[in-house]
């Protein structure tokens, strides 16, 4: 008999480990799909909510935020690229270049989660690819609309949302909910609204945890 679980994937578009973690989670779910099925819901988290329009050079940002050296940054970039390759996610050889505010991307994800939930995972991956593979400006409305179009949803509706304040309160409410629940780093994978797996885990870790929780 097949079990069913819900997974809340709390993450930010600009987080490379979120791309790794989601790709690993997808592989794990594919491995066990005959035994366990899952509804995956994407929840918002902003690593840099105060980021100004136009973003910031990524090296400058990492130096200011983490006090990391260029050598450390290069090593981490290579580690992330290797981990991505292991789970089928392609990172740009040149890195992200800049880091951007992602609030509007989260608004679009919330819209799709409300009105077209079956396509929310596709939009999430399209946005991650635009950011980490294609080095796009993730605060640019045209970039966000193209991501919406790639998953077959209405570009006009996306433009309408981006032109106003729709879903802003919803996104902020969800961000506050997860922060108050103790989520301060992403990705955070919450299974059946109770069990937390933190960080971009390997495929086998997700697979083992999901099997155990689904049968428990």
Image: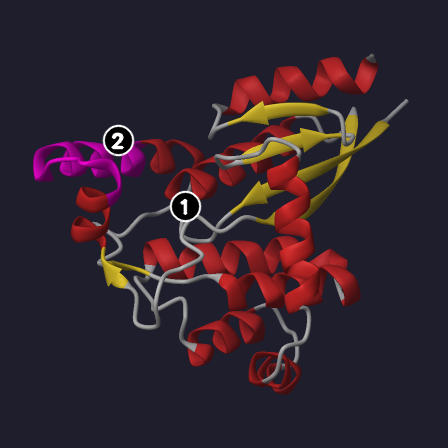
Q: Quadrant of residue 133?
A: bottom left
The colour scheme used to paint the residues is: secondary structure
**Can you tell which mark lies on residue 79?**
2
Residue 22 picture location, percent across and down: 53, 40
Main secondary-structure element of the magenta-colored stretch: helix
Question: With respect to residue 52, does 80 lie above or below?
Answer: above
Left or right: residue 207 compared with residue 115: left
Helix, strand or loop for disc 1? loop
Helix, strand or loop for disc 2? helix
Label located before the other in sequence (2 or 1): 1
User: Quick one: label 2, few (<14), some, or many (20+) residues within 10 Å?
Assistant: few
Q: Nearer the viewer, mark 2 or mark 1?
A: 1
Residue 173 picture location, percent across and down: 69, 54
Q: Which residues are magenta?
A: 65-82
Residue 17 picture location, percent across and down: 41, 38
Q: What residue does disc 1 label? A: 15
Question: With respect to residue 10, does 114 lie above or below?
Answer: below
- Which residue is found at the position 30% from the left and 35% from the top? 80
Question: With respect to residue 148, does 198 lie above or below?
Answer: above
User: Would residue 77 be seen by someone viewing this image from the given angle?
Assistant: yes
Left or right: residue 182 compared with residue 6: left
Frontmost residue, 205 versus 16: 16
Q: Quadrant of residue 3?
A: top right
């Amino acid at each position: 008999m097949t079990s069913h679980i819900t997974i809340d994937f709390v993450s930010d578009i600009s987080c490379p480990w979120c791309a790794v973690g989601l790709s690993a989670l997808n592989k794990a779910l594919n491995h066990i799909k005959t035994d366990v099925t899952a509804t995956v819901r994407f929840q918002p988290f902003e690593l840099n909510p105060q980021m100004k329009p136009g973003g910031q050079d990524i090296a400058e940002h990492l130096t200011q935020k983490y006090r990391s050296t260029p050598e450390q940054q290069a090593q981490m970039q290579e580690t992330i690229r290797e981990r991505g390759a292991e789970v089928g996610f392609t990172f740009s050889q040149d890195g992200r270049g800049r880091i951007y505010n992602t609030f509007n991307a989260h608004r679009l994800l919330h819209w799709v989660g409300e009105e077209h939930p079956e396509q929310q995972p596709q939009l999430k991956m399209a946005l991650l690819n635009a950011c980490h593979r294609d080095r796009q400006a993730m605060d640019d409305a045209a970039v966000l609309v193209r991501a919406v179009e790639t998953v077959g949803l209405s570009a006009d509706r996306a433009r309408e949302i981006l032109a106003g304040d729709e879903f802003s309160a919803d996104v902020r409410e969800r961000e506050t909910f997860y922060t108050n629940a103790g989520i301060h780093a992403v990705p955070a994978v919450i299974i059946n609204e109770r069990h937390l797996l933190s960080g971009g885990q390997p495929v086998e870790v997700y697979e083992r945890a999901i099997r155990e929780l689904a049968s428990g």
